[in-house]
Image: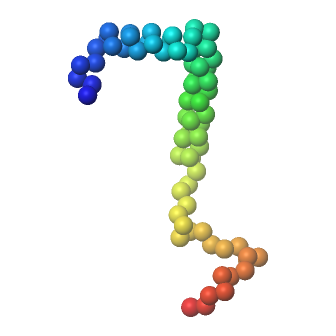
Amino acid sequence: MWQGFTGWHALIILVVILLLFGAPKLPALARSLGQSMKILKTEVRSDKDEPATGAADVQPKADEPDSGKSA
């Protein structure tokens, strides 16, 4: 699919995007993309810092009633 993709194709795609979005909107688009990437990086970093808890590790609180089923 990407075997015939060259620099000319990328240039044509860039021109089409420029025509669709317009030059004034591109800086705002790039800024929002940068902010989204920053948020994504901080979320990924915070997930790595927290210890993983599985479903088996979760225990009901003392004030929560049982489901009513007895084994």
Percent coordinates x, y for residue 56 in the rendering = 53, 70
Q: How is the image coloured?
A: rainbow
Taking depth in this image into account, of 63 and 6 the one nearest to the observer is 6
Assign the N terminus to one quadrant of the image: top left
Taking depth in this image into account, of 32 and 53 the one nearest to the observer is 32
The image quadrant that residue 2 belongs to is top left
Residue sitting at the far right: 63
Residue drawn at (45%, 9%) of the image:
15
Percent coordinates x, y for residue 61 in the rendering = 71, 73
Residue drawn at (55%, 61%) of the image:
53
Asked if residue 15 is positioned above or below residue 43 in the image, the reply reads: above
Position of residue 40 in the picture relative to residue 68 (left or right): left
Asked if residue 14 is positioned above or below residue 36 in the image, the reply reads: above
Residue sitting at the far front: 20
Position of residue 15 in the picture relative to residue 48 (left or right): left
Asked if residue 5 is positioned above or below residue 61 in the image, the reply reads: above
Residue sitting at the far bottom: 71
The image quadrant that residue 68 belongs to is bottom right
Position of residue 15 in the picture relative to residue 41 (left or right): left
Percent coordinates x, y for residue 8 in the rendering = 32, 9
Taking depth in this image into account, of 20 and 38 the one nearest to the observer is 20
Assign the C terminus to one quadrant of the image: bottom right
Residue drawn at (61%, 34%) of the image:
39
Q: How many numbered badges does the structure rendering display?
A: 0
Residue drawn at (61%, 14%) of the image:
25
Residue sitting at the far left: 3
